[in-house]
Amino acid sequence: MLRKKVLPVNDYTTVGKSVMRIDGLQKTTGETKYAGDIALPGALCLKVLRSKIAHGLVKNIEICEAMKVPGVVQIFTHADVPGINGYGIIVKDQPMLTDKVRFKGDAVALIAAEDEVSAEKAMALIKVTYEELPPLYDVLDAMKEDAPAIHEKGNILGIYKIKKGDAESALQCADVVIARKYTTQRIEHLYIETEAGVAYMDNDMLVIKAGTQNPHYDRRDVARVLGLPLNKVRIMQTPTGGGFGGKLDISVQCFLGLAALKLGRPVRMVYDRETSFIASGKRHPFYIDFTTAADKQGKLVAVKVRIIGDTGAYGSYGPATLNRGAVHATGPYEVPNVDIESYCVYTNNPFSGAMRGFGTPQMAFATESQMDLVANAVGISPVDIRRRNILKEGSLTATQQQLNSSIGIGKTIEAAWEKALQVMPGLGDENK
Amino acid sequence: MAEFHLETTVNGKSIVKNIDPSMRLLDFLRNVLHLTGTKEGCGEGECGACSVILDGELVDSCLVMAPQAHGKEVITIEGLAESGEIAPYQQAFMEVGAVQCGYCTPGMILAARVLLNNNPKPSKKEITRAISGNMCRCTGYTKIIQGVQTAASLKEAKDQQNVDIEFENLAEMDASRHAAKEGVTRE
Ligand code: FES
Ligand code: FES
């Protein structure tokens, strides 16, 4: 009978050992070809004209003068999008080239030229006439009943609720109740490599090579926007110079695809840093209203949390971010009664999407601040309040998930506290 | 437009080209010489991804015009590899995990090389200062600093080895001279 040989831990070839990156050598010699390093002979240079207004309808795009610039091959607008003009990871709400502008930076026209200089000259000569609409930069204004609708279905993209026990009555009779408001800021990922890619036709197959974190999703969206069957689109992820969630979204892919498909020529596109800042997704700013209730010993009895996330002009990973924000609002602590609601809301700001942690870093700031305030009110140390409420084996999370293994947070706190005492002697006395 | 007659040395090779005088050194290296190891991150002197060595000094090639390299010597990441000198840096950066996405790596390694050339045993503070013009968004710098430290010791060991080899050669020469005197031939 064949038996699987079970190796003792120290015999594993990789587990428990430091392993060198498979592509480390090429990266240290400069050999690695990122998207912007790929040389495609005869490739056209692509540039996007982006809106300078935040909200409005595109009434007319005048390209005659721009087309006369020597070197300009073609200029595309929303009218040239062959498929369904909307992409997005969760909701397909972002047009590739738009006829309704929803933020300063929305793509209005795509220029294909022999070189960068002529593409830029042409860009300056395109005349766009807008009917401006009042812009909504504030997420609370956007939620008002009479606010202008940024998208057809209104400005609230999603609501996520977690209810357990009876938070209201627990809040009524708790010994300590702390209520505070928190806000977190918009953050740019700032990967060192800006978005870039190349595309070409391989017979009737559209091939796109791009710096992306999401080749499969890209493929689906490119096929949708260009009206192609999935098996006619091939996306290859080039070595990606940082992403942190920001390269999950479509950036250059659809532009490259459209131009390569329509012109039958290889194309190339590299964002400069300014474009990368303007056009890419950000970390969601959160507006958090947090109420925490505890008994005299500092044991949590209830939390009531309201979260509003500014997803900007488009959804991207917004619904997932707000959903996770809600799920993790209680932090690594056990709370018997919870009442959490989170809202994913459109504004005319740059769009927000995934960024390292998906809504939990924003919440951690609020949750942990609340813990410190409760500790203070009860008269125990910040470490003790955490010891008393930490998730352990068998604990139930806010969504009633029972945790049966792999709960390291208690050990982490003790290790961190030990280290803190080492590097800051005397800390223990203050917090007895 | 008037062209600039550029004569420069890049990675030990002499280059003669007529170029647009408004061209950045970065574009000259990437687009004219196809040395794409030098990266563009910001285009305005903030990130150091475009770092190259110009006459022994680390410069942001996005802020240097190509004509400024006239009569000078440029070393890019590719040149480091070719000269066979890169091993300690490569080895060190790979071993400690200082390379993640790798986009900042060429610039970081060149910064490390300029530092170690001038100061073979830098303190942590000196390393931090030397790489302060180079941004990395992935590592958090701890590993990069370790990488430079490791490179320093690998380089020292290698230099030591070279010295030892020289000594061995000397000893060998001595021995053969000795043998010749005594009329014995060595194999
Ligand atoms: S590209 Fe030159 S410093 Fe950033
Ligand atoms: S390794 Fe990614 S920027 Fe440094």
Image (spheres, helix red, strand yellow):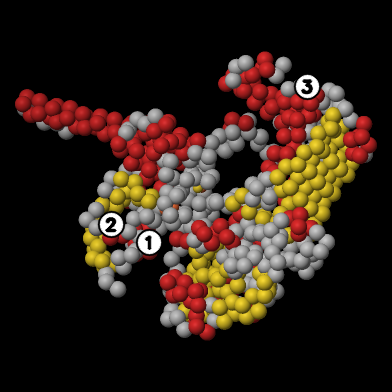
Front residue of B37 and A108: A108
Disc 1 versus disc 2: nearer the observer: 2
Residue at the image position 81 percent from the left and 64 percent from the top? A146
Q: Chain of mark 1?
A: B
Callout 1: 10 Å neighbours few (<14), some, many (20+)? many
Residue at the image point whose x is 89% and y is 30% from the top: A174
Element marked by disc 3 = loop
Image quadrant holding the C terminus of chain A, namely top right
Q: For the residue labelled by badge 2, is the local secondary structure a helix, a strand or a loop?
A: helix
User: Is A401 placed left or right of B77 in the picture?
Assistant: right
Beta carbon of the mark 1 residue lies under 8 A of ligand 1: no
Per the image, the residue denoted by label 2 is: B68
Check residue B27 in the rendering and tell me which mark sits there, or answer none.
1
A335 left or right, relative to B31: right
- Quadrant of res B149: top left
Q: Is residue B15 above or below residue B118?
A: below
Q: Give the crowd class for mark 2: few <14, some 14-19, many >=20 residues within 10 Å.
A: some
According to the picture, the residue beneath numbered tag 3 turns out to be A379
